[in-house]
Amino acid sequence: MNETRYPLCWPANWKRTTSRASATFSKTSHRDDATGGYVGRSKLSVPAAVERISVELFRMGIKEEGVIVSTNVALNLSGGPRGDRGEPSDPGVAVYWTRNGKSQCIAIDRYRRVADNLAAVAATLLALRAIERHGGGSILDRAFIGFAALPAAPVDWRAVLCIHPQTNVTQEIIENAFRVLAVRRHPDKGGTHDMMAELNAARAEALRENRW
């Protein structure tokens, strides 16, 4: 996978939420093993929400090192989202992993807080596992068909990244072009979500097409 942990790498052909809501996840704190849900009264943090996702994916047999949690929250030294920064203008999250040889993803931006969108991913995974327990082993794989990104139209990555058609590209050239353009396209820098999604898609396509 070429998805980035930071900034947010939103699936290129997934629609974005235009009106966000407050979530009840901000009033939950720990897992109740008896019910499988989360209870408590403390405000949910980003690291705690990421941990919920890790637990649910582990229960699906997904190893943590194969998971990418992509957000607009700056990373800590271990590569995970920091929990001591303010909310970014785009609180969306996208979680990528591979299961049974298939790339899978859940992306949510319904809520105003990054932690709440991460918690929504964990809650979705929990619900899908419950469906699998009652419906048989193939239910979960079929359910994720709805989350899988549909094949997108080919991206003219050279045009998006402003790389001349005759340039013999390297990974360094691609990454440098991405960083320069991200300064202008990122929502926090005056750009838009769609502009950043297009740039992320162009970078991913460029890296896929050029395998060194």
Image: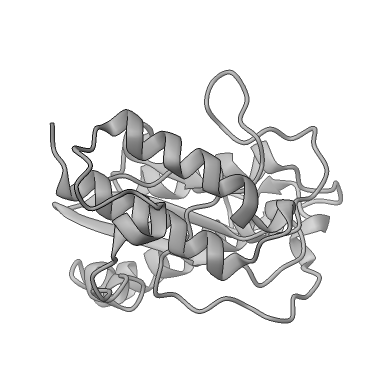
Horizontal side, residue 80 vs residue 25: left or right = left
Asked if residue 5 can be seen in this view, the reply is no
Which residue is painted at 42% across and 42% down in the image? 68
- Visual colour scheme: one colour
Which residue is painted at 64% across and 66% down in the image? 192
> In the image, is residue 87 above or below residue 187?
above
Q: Nearer the viewer, residue 46 or 211?
A: 211
Q: Nearer the viewer, residue 153 or 158?
A: 158
Horizontal side, residue 26 vs residue 183: left or right = right
Which residue is painted at 83% across and 43% down in the image? 86
Horizontal side, residue 122 vs residue 190: left or right = left
Q: Nearer the viewer, residue 44 or 130?
A: 44
Q: State the image coordinates of residue 147 (x, y, percent, origin top left).
A: 36, 72
Asked if residue 169 can be seen in this view, the reply is yes
Which residue is the extreme one toward the top?
77
> In the image, is residue 30 above or below residue 194?
above
Which residue is painted at 74% across and 81% down in the image? 19
Q: Quadrant of the C terminus?
A: top left
> In the image, is residue 42 above or below residue 24?
above
Q: State the image coordinates of residue 135 (x, y, percent, origin top left).
A: 27, 77
Q: State the image coordinates of residue 190 (x, y, percent, origin top left).
A: 73, 58
Q: State the image coordinates of residue 50 (x, y, percent, origin top left).
A: 58, 42
Q: Nearer the viewer, residue 13 or 172?
A: 172
Q: Quadrant of the N terminus?
A: top left
Residue 64 falls in image quadrant: top left
Horizontal side, residue 151 vs residue 179: left or right = left
